Amino acid sequence: MSKKKFVPIFTNKNIPTFVKVLIAIPLLFFALILLVAGLSIIGAIAIHDTDTPNTGIETLMASEEIIKVTAIDLWLEYKQNEIKADMKYEDKLLEVNGTVIELGKDVFNTPFIRLAGLFEGVVCNAEESELLKMSELSKGDFVTVRGRNDGYLIYVTLEDCIIV
């Protein structure tokens, strides 16, 4: 009895090129999606690493000129002329007072206070060291915060905020 040699139906030689391409494209697309998602997660963690110690923002704030403004006035200046307001306030240390509209944490677990209007206004991204003070606040309270202006998108955003 003669042994029959096993011949696979699909070998590299008898698979048409277009089938190989049809198989390869979704795999490459999936790999690209995984790569982008992974890099996004790594980037988000690196940018919003809350385990780093306080860099002494209060010390830096003490040696720099502080511009005092109300939350409503700051927001209105940005709403009326963003270019002019950026020239006056961007990257500057601001002391802003206003009514607390919202208290919470963002998607990166950064505590924030929103002041001024119902849908717009000033968002103060607070330092972790301010959590105890923030826990004593309620909506409707009048508060003064100090932080560095990061500009305007939907809200005027202050970074590294402390409650004064």
Image (spheres, rainbow, N blue to C red):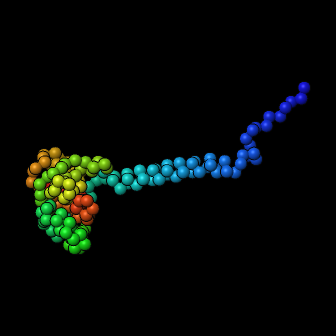
Q: Is residue 30 visible?
A: yes
For this view, does 151 lie left or right of residue 72?
right
Up-down relation of residue 69 to residue 14 (above or below):
below
- Name the image quarter holding the C terminus: bottom left
Q: How many marks?
A: 0
Residue at (9, 50) in percent of width and height: 141
- Name the image quarter holding the N terminus: top right
Residue at (33, 52) in percent of width and height: 49
Picture quadrant of residue 89? bottom left
Considering depth in this image, is 152 or 137 the residue closer to the camera? 152
Residue 36 x %, y %: 47, 53
Residue at (20, 66) in percent of width and height: 79
Residue 25 x %, y %: 59, 51
Residue at the farthest right position = 1
Residue 133 x %, y %: 15, 49
Considering depth in this image, is 103 or 61 the residue closer to the camera? 103
Residue 101 x %, y %: 15, 51
Q: Is residue 58 visible?
A: no
Considering depth in this image, is 39 or 8 the residue closer to the camera? 8
Residue at (37, 51) in percent of width and height: 45
For this view, does 87 lie left or right of residue 20?
left
Residue at the farthest top position = 1
